Image: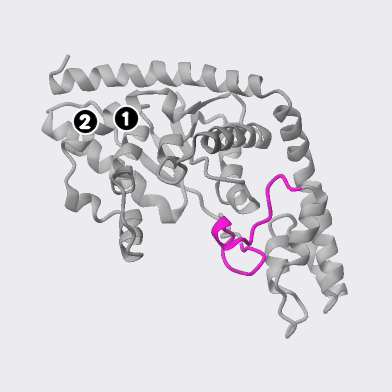
Amino acid sequence: MNKILLSGVKPTGQAHIGNYFGAMKQFVDLQKSGDFDCLFMIADYHALNLIQDKEEMKKLTLELALDYLAIGLDPKKSIIFKQSDVSAHTELSWIFDTIVTMPYLMRAHAFKDAEAKDKEINVGTFNYPVLMAADILLYNTDVVPVGADQKQHVEYARDIALKFNHIFKSETFKLPTDLIMKDVAVVPGTDGRKMSKSYNNIISLFATREQITKAVMSIVTDSSGDIPVNVYAIHRLFKTEAELKPLYEANKGRYKTLKDALVEDIDAFIKPMRERREKLAKDPKKVIKILEKGAKQAKKIADKKLIEVKNSIGVL
């Protein structure tokens, strides 16, 4: 019997190669493995902490659905759905709110980060680990693929599941485990820092040849060495060290030649996904139907669990 795997991504902007090699590629690999029943969620309610414009939310949600499908997530093999289409997420989150304490949530990384920046923190940012726990626990999830820096999300879900089962003397929730994606590169941006939209140092996952060229030519190089470190670090994502060694040895100090080679390799890698995405984008109704089908599948599982929860707490 396959284990249940769930992951979610917020629709907050353009996907870049850092997103792909940091997480999205692993989603596809896990789907292909055949070892998991996969659910991939568009976490639009989580995104509401950041995106508070109707048209932008609609646009970004469709964009992320296109991204999922273009990289190879298959609605015949996985459930692909919007969080907001399954009302059990927010209903279970409220039930969890009644047993989770404020001091506990104040230990969350996102809250600490926001507090350190002296932000006026909204309740959604403060409370998002509870909604995330609901996301995970609704589906009897066994594993949640995360980077090492996101392990706390799964720990919160486990803690809340344990507390609920103890308070209500039940075995309502199983305890999920994190699936730490090892050997996942921290993808450097064009300026050498971690690739991030906030740093404006990204290479778009579905970039055109022209856009790739512009981004690669802007990569910051260190003129003190024979090998441009930032160029090589990005190139390693697309070619093995064995393939790159003769190229870089033959072109020591020739940064333009090495950048041209990187453009070729990125474009060759991106082109099939870009073309799939362009084709899918011409038929948005088809994409919406995939999300609607996924919502029905997810809702069936989530609603069954919510009935079990309601029985446990005595409201049903």
Residue placed most toward the observer, 98 or 145: 98
State the residue lying farthest toward the bottom: 224
Q: Is residue 263 left or right of residue 74?
A: right
| Depth check, front residue: 199 or 159 | 199
Where are the magenta residues, as a range? 188-207
Disc 1 and disc 2: Cα gap in Å?
9 Å
Tag 1 residue: 90
State the predominant SS element of the stretch in magenta. loop
Position of residue 69 measured from the top left corner of the image (x, y, whole percent): 64, 31
Q: Please tell me the numbered disc located at residue 95.
A: 2
Which mark is first along the chain, 2 or 1? 1
- Compared to residue 52, the image places residue 182 above or below, namely below
Q: What colour scheme has been applied to the protein in the rendered image?
A: one colour
Q: Quadrant of the N terminus?
A: top left
What is the three-letter code of the residue carrying label 2? Ile
* Label drawn at residue 189: none
Q: Quadrant of residue 252?
A: bottom right
200 falls in the magenta region: yes
Label 2 Cα neighbours within 10 Å, binned few <14 / some 14-19 / many ≥20: some
- Left or right position of 159 against 262: left
Image x and y of residue 109, in percent: 34, 56
Q: Quadrant of the C terminus?
A: top left
Residue 246 makes an appearance in the image: no
Residue drawn at x 58%, y 49% is: 19
SS at badge 1 = helix
Residue 237 percent coordinates (x, y)? 68, 56
From this view, report whether residue 114 is shown above or below residue 253.
above
- Closer-to-camera residue (124/8): 124
The amino acid pointed to by label 1 is Thr
